[in-house]
Amino acid sequence: MGAKTVKRIESIVIRFAGDSGDGMQLTGDRFTHESAVFGNDLATLPNFPAEIRAPQGTLAGVSSFQVQVAEHAVLTPGDAPDVLVAMNPAALRANVKDVARGGTIIVDTHEFTSRYLSKAGYPRDPLEDASLAGYAVHPVDMTSLTVEAVKEFGLGRKDAARAKNMFGLGLVSWMYGRPTEATEAFIRSRFANRPAVRDANLAAFRAGWNYGETAEVFAVSYSIPPAPMPPGRYRNITGNTALAYGLMAAARSAGLELFLGAYPITPASDILHELSKHARFGVTTFQAEDEIAGVCAAIGASYGGALGVTSTSGPGVCLKSEAMGLAVSLELPLVVVDVQRGGPSTGLPTKTEQADLLQVMYGRNGEAPLPVIAPRSPADCFDAAVEAARIAIRYRTPVVLLSDGYLANGSEPWRIPEAGDLPVIEPGFATAPNHTTEDGSRRFWPYKRDPETLARPWALPGTPGLEHRIGGLEKGDGHGDISYEPANHDLMVRTRQAKVDRVAEVVGDTWVDDPDGEARLLVIGWGSTHGSIAAACAALRKRGHPVAQAHLRTLNPFPRDLGDVLRRYDRVVCPEMNLGQLSMLLRAGYLVDVVGCNQVSGLPFQVAELEDVLVNHLQEVGR
């Protein structure tokens, strides 16, 4: 057979799908890592059931991993897969509706039996009727080929078949010219203590590659050149890992120990897992018995002079709310990480949503304001974590870092910053008494404030002469003794609000992308909607439609110029994965008729859907 054709393409969207026990998340992660090593830009969307092991062969048990890989900047994982790798009938049925017409479908035919077809809801074999006529279908018995490739290693058939995901990875890696060295090194490391399993997975991976190289049905492979990126050292990173690294970097920059008090909860648990690996960098992790214990331990750590952090998801924020109010009253640094998921209640543990905004803004008794920061991409989780810690330390306040499941589990290339590029964070501990009494003596006033930030002093317990009491009862201004005076309570409530308001002085102006300044339509978002909104706006501009985009990282307080930005445009549209929470805040705060574009499907916005919505608005405003 002659040499096969290699075709250059700009980008590809691939989805790996199978049972939740088929290793699709690992397969997708390894293909992503191969692409990052090669130098492509990329974005990913893992999508898996909440059950640890959903019923085999059923639609409810399908797990998938989608990745877009390109030679240019990538903002989303892609709307429709160009390639679907389906490991069983259920994976095909659950995902084929999303595949672009004319796309490629690679199917492991081994489980296309009457039993598994029936489980998936197929009355007949879709590989033998005309239902897939609009696609390029490649039936491959990956399971049998894998078992044959690994038979020399003495594994039972069940264990041998488990390597079929590596066969699929090898085949797709050949199709798109991915480097294999990193995956082979990963397999050797992952199974170092199980030589037979290690060798079987390596053999399956190579067999998949060789199958693509030799099978006549795969006549073409594809080349996706590296994407141009600023010089630097890069690695592929998930949002949760980036967030954990950002917290560590902030603590090191401030010269503080980092303490995480957390109760495991999806999708935030990986933050606990990651930080637990780094005790040598001054990190202490405490897996608490419940959410309340986690946040209270973190508050105690902050009182003791560490950077206290607690991580959770929406249900956990409900439980932590009283302690968060305590932190507001104590005026101590605290970072509360909320990795949002579908709700209410248990809801959709493994799906994404943005429905906790109003909860973190107002979900406490009394007037209990605190800053809220929201990253916009997996890599941005690092910078947002540093920013949240900086604000918490400088202003002596709890700060909510509002991520979500899409960011937490998704990944993208991240340029590792130089240590010198990180902001300097000064904890500024109190070291001496700060108030002179009428008789001329010096004493420590725990609520005597910095005139610039309104932050109170942070005194380490045990510092001679700085003894003071803390607690949830209202404190007197300055001296910090318990006070029930009406005028004092009014002053303290207003002062705590004013302190949070002053954060706007350091967060900068609103980020706005309006290339020619002629747009009459502004699309504003927050958090993980950034990529979908930016891609939709870019597509519309290519079609000749002027449209502006604004995106908010700081949700409390808003940037000082936000009102002026909103009023510059004839129409403001706000896409968000809830029923209009930011829209409501903007309407109430600025009396601007913000129009919501709302979705609560557990999945991120598709770019094409946003384009259609925005075209309608452009027509209505006359552009």
Image: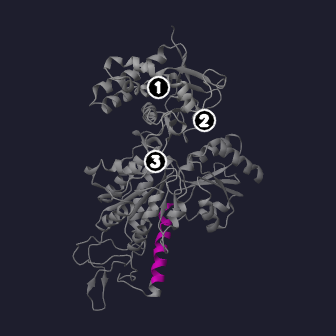
In the depicted structure, whether residue 578 falls above or below residue 135? below
What colouring does the structure picture have?
Answer: one colour
Q: What stretch is highlighted in magenta?
A: 489-508
Q: Name the residue under label 1.
A: 168
Query: Is residue 429 found left or right of 561 in the rendered image?
Result: left
Q: Nearer the viewer, residue 466 or 155?
A: 155
Q: Is residue 436 magenta?
A: no
Q: Can residue 114 be seen in this view?
A: yes
Q: Which amino acid does label 2 sit on?
A: Ala
CA distance separating discs 3 and 2? 21 Å
In the depicted structure, whether residue 174 falls above or below residue 53? above
Considering only order in the chain, which callout, 3 or 1, is on the residue closer to the N terminus?
1
> Mark 3: which secondary structure?
helix
Give x and y (percent) for residue 469.
31, 78
> Mark 2: which secondary structure?
loop
Q: Mark 3 points at which residue?
A: 408
Residue 80: assigned label: 2
Q: Residues within 10 Å of mark 1 (few under 14, many from 20)?
A: many
Q: How crowded is mark 2: few (under 14 residues within 10 Å), some or many (20 or more)?
A: many
Query: Is residue 118 found left or right of 570 in the rendered image?
Result: left
